[in-house]
Amino acid sequence: MPKNIDLTHTEEYSLSIRLIPDGFSFTIHCPTDSDIFYYKTTLFNNKLSYFENIKKLIFDLGFFTQPFKTTRVIVVSKEYTLVPEIFYEEKKIKNIFNFNITSTNETVLANKVAENDFYVLFAMNEELHSFLCRSLWNPIFMHHISQLLPYFAEHNNETEEKRCYINFHEKLMDICCFKQNKLLSANTFPINENFNALYFIVGIWEKLPMDQSTDFLYLTGNTDSQKETIDTLKELIQKVEILSFSPNITVPEEEETSPVPLDIKILLCE
């Protein structure tokens, strides 16, 4: 932990916890001082369950239970569904979610994405949700895609051409497509030796369809991990750009060098 973070005054800082498929990461930053920033990732590779690992981290580190200015829990997953606001009913969100995605022993949550007039429905383990509600100070639960969609929707939205945004992070890839402010599709896919990123990208472009000569492809996130895929995309699609996003934060050189996820960067600018 950096020396300039004083855990006796956590009420001055914002805490963001990310629940990633194979681990846990968190960020502490001060909204009024860009020099105060810390990001840490822990991957799980032991015999404990996911819930037991989270519980152990919360108790071992201790400071998570303190009163922060804001405490957010960001669920990073490929399981979510989008519901237009006109069809949204709070009492029926579990039925709507389960219609598209089978879930058991899970709490279904919703985020409103006001800029696009819809809700993001997602789920997390019921026992874990209950534990975090008890252990954290007024936690706000969010899905990572809820942060990305408003940002993508506002970017270059005056152009008539369609826009496809791809965000690489952890072992996942978000593909979000727009026509001006209108969301055309949003999906998150696994990427590893069994699931080739290029296969999913080409599939989305063919399905919508998108024009390889006139429409835009923007790449963001951990693009260094997908250099081969990006080189191939540049051969297939004419308008390919790397979309950089750099909030005004200072990351000490001695800290972890893993890239800060895009959803966290967006939160830092709020």
Image (tube, rainbow, N blue to C red):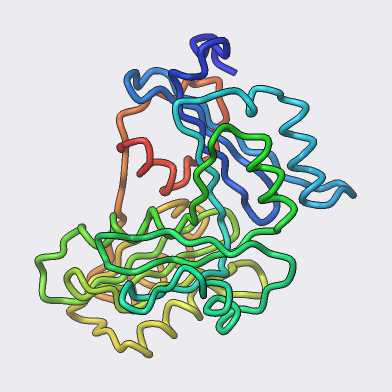
Residue 137, placed above or below residue 216: above
- Left or right: residue 15 versus residue 88 is right
In x, y percent, where is residue 103? 68, 73
In x, y percent, where is residue 22? 70, 53
Residue pictured at 55% horizontal, 76% vertical: 97
Please state which of residues 152 and 163 is positioned toward the viewer in this rendering: 152
Given the current orientation, which residue lies at the most extreme right position? 47
Asked which quadrant contains residue 179, the reply is bottom left
- What quarter of the picture does the N terminus occupy? top right
Residue pictured at 50% horizontal, 27% vertical: 28
- Left or right: residue 86 versus residue 3 is left
Q: How many marks?
A: 0
Please state which of residues 206 and 234 is positioned toward the viewer in this rendering: 206
- Left or right: residue 257 versus residue 13 is right
In x, y percent, where is residue 213? 20, 81
Residue 155, placed above or below residue 214: above
- What quarter of the picture does the C terminus occupy? top left
